[in-house]
Amino acid sequence: MLCLGPEHTYSSMAAGEMNAQCPARQVGDRQLGKPTELSTITRLTKDAKPNASRTPRARHRAPLQNPDVLTSDMCRRLGANPRSARCGPELDLVISFLNGPLFAAPPRCDVAVFQEPRLASGFPDLVVVFWRRDIAQNWKSARTELHRDDIRLAQYLHQTGPTMMPDLHDSGARHSLRSLERLHAAGLVEPKHGAWALRPLSEIFAIEQLIAVEAKVSEWRAGLEQAWLNTWFASDSYLLVPHVPRGSALLEQAKEIGIGVWTEQGQVIAPTCRPKLPTSYASWLFNEWVGRIPFLANTNGKRS
């Protein structure tokens, strides 16, 4: 048991989680604010209605061959809760994308692909995670017991640096005593000169690149808005479309807000808005999810 002082509660630590590296932008006639508060991360327009003529083709497409895509069962075992698969033209587009060449992996990185993982902001169509197994494989098993409030506190300490316990109370750190106990047991925080500090990211944050992909068959402006909002957790955000509509301002507006664009033929432009990880507690969620992959593999090996 750690002697940290009396426990206080808070209402939310979501505000201000993302660093302000990417300013507010404009998509068409709509102003996009900085995605710094979780309450603002909502879908701003309705998704395009599925094209009935293309839906049967999505149902009968050949099975996905990409081994890096995590199954729904594996996602749940890792702690992520994906949305149930739904047939439609956008699923058809996503499967086509996943069966083609993906992003180039950074050196020494493994890749894990999440389809529509549940986040507080919704369900991004794809999240491609490049992570360092050599970093994650030595993590303590206590990390599998962390709560989301604990992960929020880790992000808070990442933003503020070493923090005294009274300051954590004043900041409204919910359940800070219990969270610090779990973070300490998991090896994420350590006492430092009378304060509590996050250990170096090089030891506890395994993700090198976190790529969000938003697929849209039509309504590309709504897709750009969602791709922009995905920068609250991702280091790179893309809009995936079948093709760039002739005469549209898609590429110009994507460049203005720093979003990359992919089509079925390949990458058209790369993102220029690239926040430094971790940008929010959601970045940590993916970090903890992929970090459990070696632990599950070791557990399964011992059982066999």
Image (cartoon, rainbow, N blue to C red):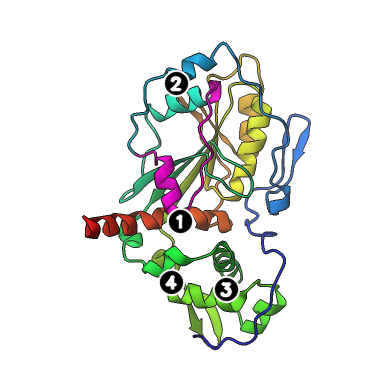
Residue tagged by mark 3?
A: 161
Residue extending farthest to the top is 53
Q: Amino acid at mark 4?
A: Ala
Disc ID at residue 5: none
Relative to 103, say whether 21 is above or below: below
The CA span between labels 4 and 2 is 44 Å
* Earlier sequence position, callout 4 versus callout 3: 3
Q: Residue at x 67, y 59 (%)?
A: 14
Residue tagged by mark 1?
A: 287
The CA span between labels 4 and 1 is 14 Å
- Residue 71 position within the rendered picture, expressed as x and y whole percent measured from the top left: 40, 40
Q: Amino acid at mark 2?
A: Gln
Name the mark nearer the viewer: 4 or 1. 4
* Earlier sequence position, callout 4 versus callout 2: 4
Q: Secondary structure at mark 3?
A: loop
The local crowd at label 2, few if under 14, some if 14 to 19, many if 20 or more residues have their Cα within 10 Å, is few
- Give the quadrant of residue 166: bottom right
Q: Amino acid at mark 1?
A: Asn
The reply to whether callout 3 and callout 2 are in contact (CB within 8 Å) is: no
Residue 85 within the segment the image draws in magenta? yes
- Residue 259 position within the rendered picture, expressed as x and y whole percent measured from the top left: 58, 37
The CA span between labels 1 and 3 is 20 Å
The CA span between labels 1 and 2 is 30 Å
Mark yes or no: residue 9 visible.
yes
Q: Amino acid at mark 3?
A: Gly
Residue tagged by mark 2?
A: 265
Residue tagged by mark 4?
A: 186
Magenta residues (range) = 68-90
Q: Residue at x 51, y 47 (%)?
A: 81
The local crowd at label 1, few if under 14, some if 14 to 19, many if 20 or more residues have their Cα within 10 Å, is many
The one nearer the camera, 72 or 204, is 72
